[in-house]
Image (tube, coloured by chain):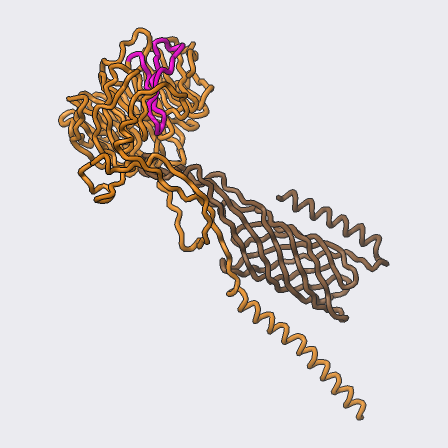
Amino acid sequence: MKYLMLFILLVTRTVISVAQQKGTAATCQFHSINSIGLLEGSAGSAFQLQTINGAQYKSWFGGIGLGLDYYRYRTVPFFIDLRKEFGKNANKLFVYSDLGVNFGWVTDKQKTQYVSDDKFANGFYSDLGFGYKVNLGKNGGLVMSLGYTYKKVIESYKLPLYLYGNSIYSEPPLNDQTVKYSYSLNRITIKIGWEF
Amino acid sequence: MQRLRLFSSQLQNNRMKKKFYFRYPVCFIAFLVLLLPGCMKDKIRKTYQITTPVFETLTKLRESIKSQPAISIMAPGKITVAGKYILLAEQGKGIHVIDNSNPSTPRNVSFINIPGNEDLAITGNTLYADSYGDLVTFDISDPLDVKAENFVTNIFPDHNNYYYPSAGYLTDTSHNADSINIIIGWTARDTTVDYDPSGSYIGYYNSCLNCAAAPATYIANASAPAIGTGVATNGSTARFNILNSFLYTVGATSLTTFDISQPSRPSFTSSVQIDPHVETIYTLKNRLFIGTNNGMYMFDVQTAPATPKLAGEFTHLRACDPVIADDNYAYVTLNDASACMGSLNQLQIVDIHDLGNSFLVTSYQLVHPEGLSKDGDDLFICDGTDGLKIFNVADVKNIHLVKQLKNADVHDIVTENGLAIVVAADGIYQYDYADLNNIHLISKL
C-alpha cells in the first residue's frame, strides 16, 4: 500500500510538472489539491488526508485522488475526482464528486483478536459535496468543502477452535467457520486544503 | 454630491451583499455540520453459518459401536499400545487397531467404531473409551472382533451431547436410551443479519489441550505379548489413565475416579473439581500429575485411591501443558496453542521432591512442544513442526539437545524398549533408538 501511494504521488507530480512547463498558454492547467479533514459518523470522528492531482479545463476539473481514511478502519481510498466551479469571481463555489475503490490498510489494533485469517477486502468509495475556493494568487488557493462520503469495508475471518470443555463434540464445529462483516459507512466530511 | 452619495450607497450595498454571501453560507455549513452527522448511520451486516444438529437415538448409536474393517487414518488422536497391537484413536470416530508385530511393517487391521470418542486406556483385556458422555467398556481379547460390554451413561457431562426430551437437559436420571438423542453431526447454512457492534459479544471458550493431539499407551513388537497383560503406559497427552485397580479420567474441569476391580464393570467412586482448563493426566507410582492451562496439580492416591487428595500444585503462565514425571522431577511442556490462549513455548522442569513445595528448576525454549516421554536420562519431546527432539537430562540444570528428527509434525510419543512410537499429524512414525546416536525411522503408517 505504501508503494502504491508513493507511485501515485510520483506519477501525478511528474505529470503536473511536465504539463505546467508545456501548458502555460493552454486552457488546460494542472492542479494539485492537498487537504486534511474530519469525518463524522455514528462511530464518532476520524481524521482523513487526501491528495488529488489533475487538470482544470475552464470551470471543470478532473483528477485522480489518493487518501487516508481513519474512520472505523484505516483504509486508502483511490478515486477519480470531478469538480465544477461556479461564479466569475476569483473566489469560487464548487461541487465535487469522487468515485473509487477503498483499499483496506487496517492496523493490527483494529483487527479482530483471537481469530485467524483476518482479511479486509477492497470496497466501494464515494464522496459528494460542495465547497469554496479562496484564490490567493499565484501561490494557489485555500479550498474548503463539506460533503457526504461513503466507504465499504468487508472483513472476514475464521473462528478459532471452539471447544466447550475438552470436547469437540458438544458444540457446533465452528473452528472452520468463516464470519464476514460488511460495513457500509456513511459519514459527513469536512475538508480544508491547499490547491496549487 | 449626489454622485458621491450614490457611490457610497452602492459601496455599502456591495459590502452588505458580501456579508450576505459570506455569512449565510457559513451559517448554512455550520448548520449542516452540526446536524447531519446525527443522520449518518453505519450499516453493518454479519454473515455467518447457522448450524443445526443432526440427532440419533442413543440406542441406535450404541448398536453401531463395534469392530468393522480398517479405515484410513485421517485425524490421529490418542494412542495405546497393548501387546503387539497399537490402538490409535481417530478423533471423534473410533479407534484403529494396528498390528505392530513387526514395527517396521505395521498393519492397520480393523477399526472399532465409537462415535464421539477421544480417549482410551487399557488394562488386561479391557479397553475403556469414551463415547460422547459415556464411558464404554470393551472386551478386546480378540482385537479384531471387539464389542461394547458396558456403558456408564452420561458420566462425562462436558462431553455430553445428550438431550432428554421428557425431563430436560441432564435432569433425566432414567437414562432410557431410546428417549435420549445424541448429536452425531451438524448441518450448516449461511445467514446474514444486521449487526450492532456495541451490543454484541463474541465469546470464545477455549480450554482444549490436546484434542488435536495424540496420546497414550503400550508398545508392541514381535516379542511383546498379545493383549491381556498389564496396564497400558499412556502418553503425556492422555486424559484416561489406570493405576492399580482404578481408572482416573480428567474432564474439562475435574478429575473423576472409577473403581475397575471388576474390569468390565467400572463404578464411579469420586469426582473432584480442579481447574477450569484441565488437560492431561499422568500416573506415577501413587501419584497423579494433572496438567492444566494454569499449572500442574499433583494428587496422592496411596492412602485413598478412590478419592485422590491434592498434594501440591505448581502454577505457570497460561499455556497448554502436557506433563510427565519421574521420582524427583516433573517435565512440563508449555505451548501457545490458540485453544489455550498462551504465549509460552518451552520445557519446564519442576522439582517435586516435596510435592507441597515444588519449584521450577529450569526452563528450555522450544518451538511448539506437545507430548513427551522419558527413558532413562533421555527426554523425548514432540516439538510440533520442529520435529522430535531428544535431550539428555542427566543433569536437569544443564540439559542439552542430543538429537533432532525434523521429518514430521509430531504431537505425542511413547517410548519403550528402544522403540519410539510417535503420533504425527499424518500418522504414526516409529523410530529405533536402541542406539541413540543411530536413531532412525523404521516405519510410517
Q: Residue at x 74, y 62 (%)?
A: A140
> Is residue B417 shown above or below A45?
above
Q: Colour of chain A?
A: brown
Q: Nearer the viewer, residue B246 or B376?
A: B246
Q: Nearer the viewer, residue A133 or A160?
A: A160
Q: How many marks?
A: 0
Residue B269 lies in quadrant: top left
Q: Quadrant of the N terminus of chain B?
A: bottom right
Q: Colour of chain B?
A: orange
Q: Is residue B94 magenta?
A: yes
Q: Quadrant of the C terminus of chain B?
A: top left
* Place of residue A30 in the rendered image (x, y in percent of width and height, measured from the top left): 77, 56
> Is residue A128 shown above or below B2?
above
Classify residue B232 as left or right of residue A158.
left
Classify residue A132 as left or right of residue A164.
right
Q: Which residues are magenta?
A: B83-110
* Place of residue A116 in the rendered image (x, y in percent of width and height, measured from the top left): 47, 39
Q: In the current view of this chain or complex, which residue is farthest to the bottom?
A: B1
Q: In the current view of this chain or complex, which residue is farthest to the left?
A: B303
